[in-house]
Structure formats: C-alpha cells, structure tokens
Amino acid sequence: MLLFGGQSAEHDVSRATAVAVARALDPAKYDIVPVGITTDGRWLLAGKAQKMLAEGRDALPAAFAVEGDLVPVPSASRTSEVDVVIPLLHGPYGEDGTVQGVLELAGLPYVGAGVLGSAVAMDKIAMKRMFVGAGLDTARALTLRDGQDVDEFVRRVQAELTFPCFVKPANMGSSIGVSKARTRSELRDAIAHAFTYDEWILAEEMVPGREIEVGILGDDPAVASLPGEVVPAADFYDYADKYEDGKAELRAPAPLSAEQTAKVQQLAVRAFEACRGEAMARVDFFLRDDGVFVVNELNTIPGFTPISMYPRLWDVSGVPYAELLDRLIDLAIARAQRRAGRRGRQR
Ligand SMILES: Nc1ncnc2c1ncn2[C@@H]1O[C@H](COP(=O)(O)OP(=O)(O)O)[C@@H](O)[C@H]1O
Ligand SMILES: [Mg+2]
C-alpha cells in the first residue's frame, strides 16, 4: 500500500513521489494499492486515491514533474490484503510517529522508522538531546515554550548564541517556520513566526560551513551511503530553494576526501542509532571550516522523488531506485516478523 498526500505542506511533493514509486515497483512482484490522504486528513481508497494522484499532477512544482503514465489501476484494492505499507508522507501526521502508531495498531508492516524514532526525529529539541547524549557535535541551542518569558529568552540568545542565529519550531520540516535572525528585532519576529507552528521552539547558534547529507539504509547493521552536498542558492536552504525555485544544487557524491567521507559516514550511523532510527533516514550535517562535522538533523522519511538527495545518494552508492524500494520493503517485512516473535507483541 502506498500511503501518500497528507496534511503537511509537502502534500504535493508526496503525490509526485507516489507516482514515481508506483512506476518503479516491479508489477510482477507487487500489486499496488494507493491510499491518498487529503489536506484535511481524509483517507481515500483505491479509485479516489487514483483520481487524487491524477488531479494533483498539474499542481506539482516543475522540478518534480513526473513524465509518462500515472499509477496503473490496481488489481487488488482491498486494504485487508495489504502485506506492507510504504508511508510516503512528510512532516506532522506522517513522519512524526502518528501514522506509524496507527499502522502498529492495525498490525501492518511498514517501511521506515517506528513510532519512537519517528517522534524523536520530528522534534528538534528531543533529537538534539539524543545527539548530545551520544556525544555528537551539534549546534548550541536554547529552547522556549509559548507563554514563557520572551524578553529573558532574547537576552540569553544574544549573550550565549550571538547573532546571526537560527530560530525554528520544534516540530516542522522543509525549512517551514525557520528564520535567520541578525538583530534583536529580527529575533523577536522569528520567535513569533516559529510559534505559529509549534508550542515549542528553539534558537540555534549559526554554524557556518558546507551542508553535507548521508543516507542510511538498514539497521542491523545500519549502512551509510556516500555523502552528498547541498549548495543553497538562497541565503540558506529555505522552502523556496527546496521546492519552488529549485535552484539549490545537489551534488552526489559530495567532493570530500576519503577520510572526510569515512568520518561523516560513521557519524551518520551514530546519529541514526542515537535517535532509534530504523531502515531508512537521511542525516544532515554542517561541515565547519575547521573540519568538524556538526550534525543538524535526521529525517526519517527523506525526500524520495528520483531527483531527491536520498535516492540519488543510494544510486551513486550502487543501489538504484527500484532496488532501494525492494530493500526497504524487505526490511519492513523482516521487522514485523522479528517483532511477532517477542512476548507481549502477539496478536
Ligand atoms: N544552526 C544553523 N547554522 C547554519 N544554517 C542553518 C542552521 N540551522 C538551519 N540552517 C539552515 O536552514 C536550513 C533549514 O534548517 P533545518 O534545521 O534543516 O530545518 P528543516 O527540518 O526544516 O529542514 C538548513 O538546511 C540550513 O541551510
Ligand atoms: Mg533540513
């Protein structure tokens, strides 16, 4: 079952991904059952899901246009016969453990991180604590909850993190709600903006350097791909740069020395394990001018169109798109089988 769409800002990207994934899956091996989630949270089954894909196609950002036919009409449309679910959803209500929890309750094997790993990686404050606990370098940060003293927070940010700094809601993705603040007044605006998305926000020191990303596949053991590099066209890698302008340059693999490559791969595996990653993630770093890799974040459902960084990194690491999907599906089924053997988990 392909679960796509969803209530987040990445709804359209998810639809493009669903088309690309459906076309890459081997029809001799799989019957595809599309299930589309509308922006207001309704789950549409086969026929309507089909229509949702078709209707959304014209609305897709140019960078994600998928050529050719849409998903073939599924030969099986009964959700009771589903063997594995591929959640192609990003952000809240998709990547944050909520959908994973529903799939656990339904007893359906699914691709990617479980409830805990998904929830940890969706909350930038919890994720940072895991990184710090694992002894990884990460940008220094201060956190604030809506209703706490903003004046005091602004003073502390200026004194302890200095300007410029980055302000982010704890629970978003795609750079949504993220701002760079250079002055006290920009910091106040950034705080107010971030609070429109979440009750918890954080301010981070700015880490000047290159943006390096690593794909992880599997969890026993977790294997790291070759690293890639994002070269933002804008002041930072913001939403428009990611999806609208499409001007950011993705380099796969990143121009790094063999030692740097080995170092960042090892750090990516540590970050993945620290956050209880399972099967799939993209781990993002800053490479500081002094040569230190600073972990920024871990995405449990990374962008998955064929031109996205995660599939491209696996492609240059010897795992083409269709095979990557096969491997992820096998991992999902293997996890469900392992779990079924544990006491307290029987159904
Ligand atoms: N501490 C930081 N120092 C420098 N740049 C940052 C920092 N935090 C975020 N950025 C920039 O903002 C972008 C989005 O921030 P990120 O934390 O990755 O949020 P998201 O989860 O929305 O992708 C990053 O890709 C980077 O370009
Ligand atoms: Mg990011």
Image (cartoon, rainbow, N blue to C red):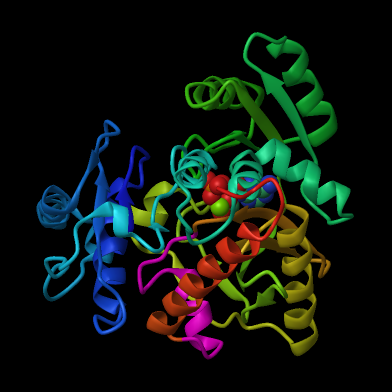
Indicate the quadrant where residue 226 lies: bottom right
Please report the residue visible at 57 percent of the width from the left and 72 percent of the height from the top: 229
Near-viewer residue (205 or 325): 325
Up the image or down, 261 lies above or below 222; here it is below
Total tally of numbered discs in the picture: 0
Please report the residue visible at 37 percent of the width from the left and 39 percent of the height from the top: 8
Near-viewer residue (233 or 334): 334
Residue 148 drawn at (x, y percent): 70, 10
Indicate the quadrant where residue 141 lies: top right
267 in the magenta segment: no
Q: Is residue 154 left or right of residue 172?
A: right
Indicate the quadrant where residue 39 lies: top left
Residue 46 appears anywhere in the view: yes
Residue 88 drawn at (x, y percent): 38, 56
Please report the residue visible at 24 percent of the width from the left and 75 percent of the height from the top: 23
Near-viewer residue (152 or 332): 332
Residue 90 drawn at (x, y percent): 43, 49
Please report the residue visible at 77 percent of the width from the left and 13 percent of the height from the top: 152
Q: Is residue 191 left or right of residue 162?
A: left
> Magenta residues, as a range?
302-319
Residue 164 appears anywhere in the view: no
Up the image or down, 256 lies above or below 191; here it is below
Q: Is residue 108 left or right of residue 144?
A: left
Up the image or down, 302 lies above or below 262; here it is above
Residue 299 drawn at (x, y percent): 57, 55
304 in the magenta segment: yes
Near-viewer residue (201 or 186): 201
